[in-house]
Image (cartoon, rainbow, N blue to C red):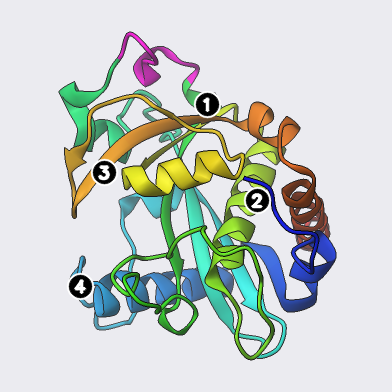
Amino acid sequence: MTFPESSCTGDGFSKYFEILPAISDNEKAAAFRIRHSVYCEDLEWENTRADGMETDAYDAHALHCLIRSRASGDFIGCVRLILTAPDDPHAPLPFEQTCGPALHRTLVDPAKMPRDKIAEVSRLAIVGQYRRRRGEKHTPAGSVQDSEPGNAEQPRFAWLLIGLYMGVFAIAARHGLEHLFLLSEPRLARHLNKIGITNVQIGKPTEHRGFRAPAVMDVQHVITNLEPLLKSVFTHVNAQLDRHYRAAS
């Protein structure tokens, strides 16, 4: 897919949004609140929690990321990378448990890969007001079909989704991760491929809140082969993350 020459560049993205790693307890809590808003309240995929935060056991060994609106200062999206458990690296990641025998292990067998070099993209969510359009109210992050970022008053969530994915790859590269797995709707996987976020299906679709198919992404391959406009967004996102990491160190 070719993107139009417009404000859909790293400069345009950075004008409206900021990506940061959720490192502090307060930042992680912001991500958990977004997840509760989307997964518990909007989609009702998880039970509501008294504290208004959606968490699970994987958060203890995950890398978390947030996206913030520059106009409002509010956190409006999040995603995490689940790492293998440091005390039990061969314990299955969530997609390995969900897919089980549906995985085509002759293509890729995550159990035989260096377990400290893999992670699973998980809990990607964008708050309702940024994603609620016809046909996409009932998805946690919307689609990638829009090609314009909109403006501060009417932002387009497609570019929030793309920004979060660029954050995923920047964080993965920073932490030496080589392959990322995800469990997604086949339609989303196809759209990601169309815009250059290359993913390869590695198993049959499985019923998990609708049909989801497991896929793998090669971190360096994706980064190296991004189209120029997405590369521009990646460069800005990577710089934003770098500033926050350095400030936190």
Contact? badges 4 and 3 (CB < 8 Å): no
For the residue pair 211 and 45, the one nearer the viewer reads as 211
- Give the mark toward the camera: 4 or 3: 3
- What amino acid type should be assigned to the residue bearing mark 3? Arg
Q: Which residue is mark 2?
A: 166
> Gap in Å between the C-alphas at discs 3 and 1?
25 Å
Residue 64 rendering spot, x and y as whole percentages:
54, 57
Question: Looking at the rendering, in which quadrant would you find the N terminus?
Answer: top right
Q: Which residue is mark 3?
A: 212
- State the SS at label 1: helix
User: Does the segment drawn in magenta span residue 202?
Assistant: no
Q: Judge whether 120 appears above or below 20 on screen.
A: above
- What amino acid type should be assigned to the residue bearing mark 4? Glu
Q: Residue at x 80, y 76 (%)?
A: 15
- What amino acid type should be assigned to the residue bearing mark 2? Met
> Gap in Å between the C-alphas at discs 4 and 3?
17 Å
Q: Which residue is mark 4?
A: 44
Q: Main secondary structure of the magenta part?
A: loop
Contact? badges 3 and 1 (CB < 8 Å): no
Say which label, 2 or 1, has the lower sequence index. Answer: 1
Q: Badge 3: few (under 14), some or many (20 or more) residues near its Cα, within 10 Å?
A: many
